[in-house]
Image: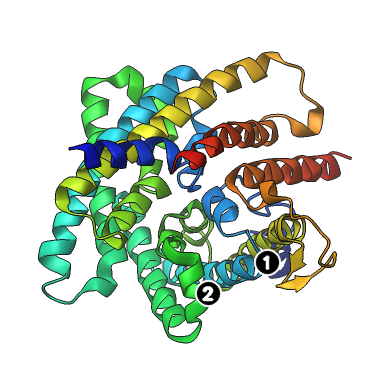
Amino acid sequence: MGDYVLLAISCILVNNILLAQYLGCCPFMGTSKKMETAIGMGMAVIFVLVMAGSITWLIDAYVLKPFKLEYLRTIAFILVIASLVQFVEMFLRKSIPALYKGLGIFLPLITTNCAVMGVCLININEEYTFVQSLVTSFSYAAGFGLALVLFAGVRERVLLARVPKPLEDTAIGLVTAGMLALAFFAFKGMA
Amino acid sequence: MAKSITQEFVKGLWDEIPPFRLVLGLCPVLAVTKSVENGLGMGMAVIFVLVCSNILVSLLRNIIPSKVRIACFIVIIATFVIVVELLMQAYTYPLFLKLGIFIPLIVVNCILLGRAEAFAYKNGVVASIADGFGIGIGFTLSLVSIGALREVFGNGTFFGMSVFGPSYQPFIFMVEAPGAFVCLGLMLSLMNLAGNK
């Protein structure tokens, strides 16, 4: 049990998917302008990532490996993730239309969110067991959500500040992200 | 479509250069630009996949039904990513190890899907090839320039060769994650400054 807690902490803080492993930056910049969208995006990613992590692990262990089809991993994983995202999209449109509107273009873009695909590949590369992959998927996603929400909070404040013209919008966003990454960088000392 | 092939090619180098003008595909930009060599390798892989997928999408654009087009694009892109993955594993193994999971992750690079959707699906083969090369080379240029900046300051080297001599104290910040974000942000602002004359 202790191992799983350690694994979770290392995935959320030390190896934060966004700020230490650089995965999932497009939605990070895109959906972090408002707190509400950031929370929605974080939730969507947690949901999709836990499902994608477990399904891709099962596919890899019971379909790709026995038939020696590892070279098809990329295409198999991306198809699983794409169909999952479609499912989440339909679910949200039906049950929570307000959130669906808020997430807008970025919901289908979870398909091309490297964080989701990246975590699935990390799970396989590190040869985690099924339970371990479940834990890492959830904690990486939680780390993503945490960074996104923190960043959205900072960014809402930056909007009020007077920023030099060329630095406006994305540029200042990236520099702010750098500062946030610096804060997370301190956790490296724990490892 | 009055635009000539040359224009389609050149626009990728300045007007729509990713990731500065089109803020897409940030992840590989941040992750693999620790050194010039990595940046260049990644850029080459992206050019290959981008050109090939643009060709195929544009050839099949009348056959692919618009409702399932995204899924088709992804399958096409994934196929070429696998090709590039196997090729790199065979011929440039050290680079393959360095880039690690970022090679399969080309498949989720928004630039590729973005170009397939925004350009290749609506235009002819020749124009799509030009577009693919333009955007791909623009992307490589950005990767190499950011890589150069980070490698020179963060490591004191350029392509593995020492720049400042042995007494240089490396500025570790630049090669780590925070430096990547700040560096990209500052380059973006410089581009804005240059573009808003």
Q: Chain of mark 1?
A: B
Q: Chain of mark 2?
A: B
Q: Is residue B160 above or below residue B16?
A: below
Which residue is pictured at 37% across the width and 53% down the height? Answer: A118
Which residue is pictured at 17% across the width and 37% down the height? Answer: A1
Q: Which residue is mark 1?
A: B36
Comparing B71 with B161, the one in front is: B161
The amino acid type found where label 2 is placed reads Leu
Q: Quadrant of residue A170?
A: top right
Quarter placement of the C terminus of chain A: top left
The amino acid type found where label 1 is placed reads Val
Q: Which residue is mark 2?
A: B95
| Residue A45 in sight here | no
Say whether residue B89 is left or right of residue A66: right
Judged from the image, the secondary structure of the residue bearing numbered disc 1 is helix
- How far apart, in angstroms, are the residues tagged by discs 2 and 1? 12 Å
Which percent across, then down, holds residue B109?
47, 55
